[in-house]
Amino acid sequence: MGNLPRAVLGGILSTRREIGMTHVIRLLTLVLALSVPGLAAAQVVLTAIHEGPDGADVETEYTFEELSALPQTEVTTDNDYVEEVTTFSGPRVTELFEEGAIEAGDELVLTALNDYSVTVPAADVLDYEVILAILMNGERMSVREKGPVWVIYPMDDNPELQEASYNDRLIWQLAKIRLQ
């Protein structure tokens, strides 16, 4: 490049700098879009699975927006994983399945993002307003804050739910719920 006129050399370097800067701006825009809730494409936060009439699994995927569009229930309660009485809101577990699909003898297998899994009696969601909390004190929960979906029992409203075994059913970072 030593033999090129200074004006041409300056133009080449300038073009390289502009291409580099354009690339950096595009990359930063992408990172920002993915980090701000609502700017990224709708992401599946929960999958509900049940047996269809033909015996095959039927999977329904829900985004945060779809869970938000279901009837919402508020539960104000305390549990071993929060520091004070907290208000949670989200749809009842029963909202994910057709009316009458859940029977008292059924079970629900709750699986978290890290594949931790617990099986709970389906009678819990029939007897109590167990919700799939998507908001805590009116705010959307990040994975770090036990979201985006956290199974919450109305523990303060039902003394029998104060038993330690119910704390094990408060699955946070819920990714999948299977009715069986």
Image (cartoon, grey):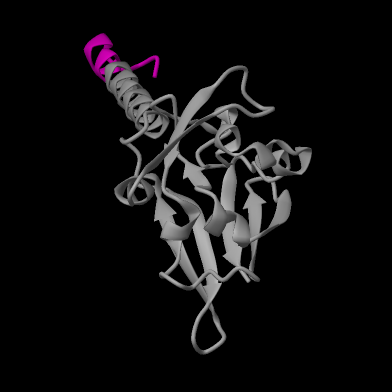
The residue closer to the viewer here, 47 or 30, is: 47
Up-down: is 173 above or below 179? above
* Residue 5 part of the magenta segment: yes
Give the residue furthest to the bottom: 54
How many numbered markers are drawn?
Answer: 0
The spot of residue 73 in percent (x, y) is 39, 42
* 92 with respect to 160 (left or right): left
* 17 with respect to 126 (left or right): left
The spot of residue 99 in percent (x, y) is 41, 69
* Residue 167 part of the magenta segment: no
The residue closer to the viewer here, 146 or 168, is: 168
* 67 with respect to 55 (left or right): left
Up-down: is 79 above or below 18? below
Q: Quadrant of the N terminus?
A: top left
The boundaries of the magenta stretch are 1-11
Give the residue furthest to the front: 159
The spot of residue 46 in percent (x, y) is 50, 53
The spot of residue 55 in percent (x, y) is 57, 86
Up-down: is 61 above or below 29? below
In the picture, residue 16 is in which quadrant?
A: top left
Q: Quadrant of the C terminus?
A: bottom right
At x 58% / y 28%, what residue is drawn?
144
At x 22% / y 12%, what residue is drawn?
7
* 5 with respect to 60 (left or right): left
At x 58% / y 47%, what residue is drawn?
174
Give the residue furthest to the right: 164
The residue closer to the viewer here, 174 or 22, is: 174
